[in-house]
């Protein structure tokens, strides 16, 4: 019964937990529509310090500066794409958590598919190379010296003796 109560408490805590954002109170825009757009853009931009977090989730000072820059651009009337283009022009494609599909990122997008196809080709080639219907190689029978060593290690009983003699034929 106690474990059931503990399980319910853990599930409620996990379900009720909201993700924490590093956005400070002084960064939040008074207009809720602009703030929602800023949050959406911030989720798409990488923190250059943390490198695997969005600027919305990072507490690094550079991430704060980038969040403020996004909000300034939105207040000045830029569209979402204009803000993203500005950030890419200033910091490069690396600032995007999901890089755009272009010629210089084609390897990034195509490599997983190429590796998958190469693996499937290798598996198919190895299956086709194997002769159809060929039985697996039978294990070699024990020599007399090996049989004596085995008998010294484990004394033969009826089951072992049958196993040894069945392989000889």
Image (cartoon, helix red, strand yellow):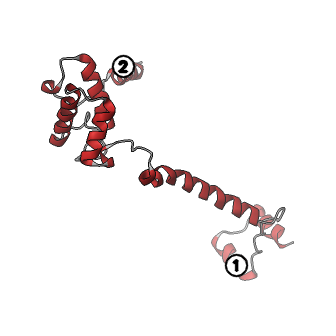
Q: Residue furthest bottom?
A: 145
Labelled pair 1, 2 in contact (Cβ < 8 Å): no
Q: For the C terminus, which image quadrant?
A: bottom right
Q: Residue at x 76, y 65 (%)?
A: 130
Local crowd at mark 1 within 10 Å, few (<14), some, or many (≥20)?
few
Residue indicated by mark 2? 12
Residue 166 is situated, as x and y percent measured from the top left of the image, at: 83, 67
Tag 2 secondary structure: helix
Q: Earlier in the sequence, mark 1 or mark 2?
A: 2
In this picture, is 123 found above or below 93? below
Residue indicated by mark 1? 146
User: Residue 1 versus residue 81: which sits nearer the camera?
Assistant: 81
Side of 45 where 31 appears, left or right:
left
User: Residue 123 versus residue 91: which sits nearer the camera?
Assistant: 91
Local crowd at mark 2 within 10 Å, few (<14), some, or many (≥20)?
few
Residue 67 is situated, as x and y percent measured from the top left of the image, at: 21, 34
């Amino acid at each position: 019964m106690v474990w059931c109560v503990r399980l319910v408490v853990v599930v409620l805590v996990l379900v009720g937990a909201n993700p924490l954002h590093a956005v400070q109170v002084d960064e939040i825009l008074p207009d809720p529509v602009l703030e929602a757009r800023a949050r959406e853009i911030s989720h798409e931009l990488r923190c250059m310090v943390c490198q695997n977090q969005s600027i919305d989730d990072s507490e690094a000072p550079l991430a704060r500066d980038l969040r403020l820059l996004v909000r300034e651009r939105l207040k000045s009337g830029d569209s979402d794409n204009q803000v993203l283009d500005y950030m890419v022009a200033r910091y490069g494609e690396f600032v995007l958590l999901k890089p755009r599909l272009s010629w210089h990122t084609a390897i990034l997008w195509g490599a997983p598919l190429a590796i998958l196809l190469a693996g499937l080709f290798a598996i198919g080639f190895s299956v086709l190379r194997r002769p159809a219907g060929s039985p697996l190689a039978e294990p070699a029978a024990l020599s007399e010296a090996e049989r004596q060593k085995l008998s010294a290690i484990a004394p033969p009983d009826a089951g072992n003796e049958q196993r040894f003699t069945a392989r000889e034929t």
